[in-house]
Amino acid sequence: MELAVYNIKGEDTGRKVALNEEVFAIEANEHAVYLDVKQFMANQRQGTHKAKERSEVSGSTRKLHKQKGAGGARIGDINSPVLVGGGRVFGPRPRNYSFKLNKKVKDLARKSALTIKAQDNQIVVVEDLNFETPKTKEFVNLTKNLKLDGKKILLVLADQNKNVYLSARNIEKANIISASDINTYKILDNKALVLTESSVAVINQL
């Protein structure tokens, strides 16, 4: 599979890059994608939720009235869960939501996500970017020239580039990532995957 390479003006340079079929043209495994995305989102959870139970609520432990003879149901102290202001029964407690996923499953999921993007024609290849200074306007012009303005995009660079990152930082629907750091969730969470020419070589080796 080959894709044309565009320059920052959105013009076809006449060059083409080859996408590794073992990465961009496999039989997509949707279940592996589901598991990898589920793990990514689970790892983002802080798990710090907490509700006070009966023993943790501030209040007297005095028995409100005698056990029998009051004409009503028996009742303990004011911290009882059945009373307003009492503790909560089986409330949430701090916990860790992360879980283990085999490396081969994660690799399969990432390749499946790249395959899905390639099949949907949502991959654009541009020549390597090198902004002399951080310029948001230049990045905006790049998205307009590629006819991607207004769309959520993920720009993949071969290496970290501070000027490009700072140029896109204030754009709501633009994200920057290094080729070695791409994951299934980031690949799928956009309308267009923009790869630089040199980043394709890195991804082909994944």
Image: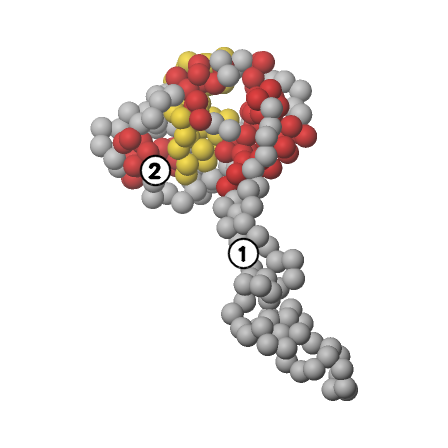
Residue flagged by tag 2: what amino acid is it?
Ala
Badge 2 element: helix
Q: Position of residue 181 (x, y in %)?
A: 44, 26
Q: Is residue 49 above or below residue 53?
A: above
Left or right of 45 in this view: 26: right
Q: Position of residue 6 (x, y in %)?
A: 40, 22
Nearest to the observer: residue 82 or residue 79: 79
What residue does disc 1 label? 50
Nearest to the observer: residue 117 or residue 69: 69
What residue does disc 2 label? 168
- The residue located at (65%, 62%) in the rendering is 89
Nearest to the observer: residue 40 or residue 182: 40
* Badge 1 vs badge 2, beta-carbon distance below 8 Å: no
- Residue furthest left as drawn: 133
Nearest to the observer: residue 143 or residue 42: 42
- The residue located at (63%, 18%) in the rendering is 26
Left or right of 193 in this view: 119: right
* Mark 2 Cα shell of 10 Å, populated few (<14), some (14-19), many (≥20): many
Quarter where residue 144 is shown: top left
Residue flagged by tag 1: what amino acid is it?
Lys
Sequence-wise, the earlier of marks 1 and 2 is 1
Q: Is residue 124 shown to the viewer in this render?
A: yes
Q: Nearer the viewer, mark 1 or mark 2?
A: 1
Q: Position of residue 159 (x, y in %)?
A: 35, 22
Quarter where residue 29 is shown: top right
